[in-house]
Amino acid sequence: MKMPDWIYPRTLWGLMHRTPTAELRFRISNLTRQTVLADCAEIADKGPKRRKGLLGRKRLSPGEGLWILPCEAVHTFWMQFPIDLVYLDREHRIKKLISDVPPWRLSGCFSAHSVLELASGTIRDTQTSPGDILEFSSASLQNDSASSAT
């Protein structure tokens, strides 16, 4: 069954169904600023992965992240570290940013379609702003093409 483009853009739909989502890693680039927000981001698009999120982790390293899809709100209950939140619309345009969200907080953006949870400081370091457009590409494909070039 082909999903409508508004649910998953064509390029992501192909990537996500070629590789199991548990193994798929994304590179997230800010096209507006020409920066990289994450080299190795996971996707949480199914029940168990969405429910667990980042719980149980001791930290989120720079370059790591979790893309929760679909999602309008998150919490940091029982987490052990602060995170940056990036709320996106269906076209991957940034709707809202929140930096350094500490544990035991709630956050939401009801016009968002998905949320990126990133290492604290990523928004500041990449100078990411509302309105910027993000691009998602397969991190494994990036690594495969780099290794085949040598």
Image: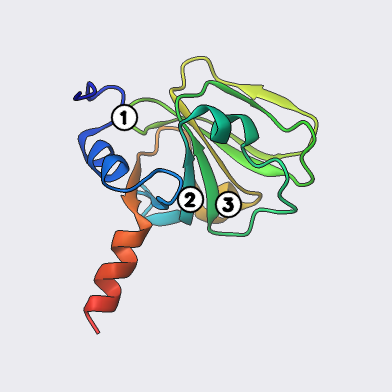
Q: Position of residue 84 (x, y in %)?
A: 62, 42
Q: Amino acid at mark 3?
A: Thr
Q: Amino acid at mark 2?
A: Ala
**Looking at the image, which residue is at 23% across and 77% down?**
148
Q: Which residue is mark 2?
A: 41
Q: Nearer the viewer, residue 132 or 26?
A: 26
Q: Is residue 91 left or right of residue 99?
A: left
**Looking at the image, which residue is at 22% across and 79% down?**
149
Q: Which residue is mark 3?
A: 122
**Looking at the image, which residue is at 37% across and 45% down?**
20
Q: Earlier in the sequence, mark 3 or mark 1?
A: 1
Q: Amino acid at mark 1?
A: Glu
Q: CA distance from mark 3 to mark 1?
A: 21 Å
Q: CA distance from mark 3 to mark 2?
A: 13 Å
Q: Answer yes or no: is residue 31 visible.
A: no
Q: Nearer the viewer, residue 102 or 44?
A: 44
Q: Position of residue 37 (x, y in %)?
A: 48, 52
Q: Earlier in the sequence, mark 3 or mark 2?
A: 2
**Looking at the image, which residue is at 29% across and 60% down?**
141
Q: Earlier in the sequence, mark 2 or mark 1?
A: 2
- Mark 2: which secondary structure? strand
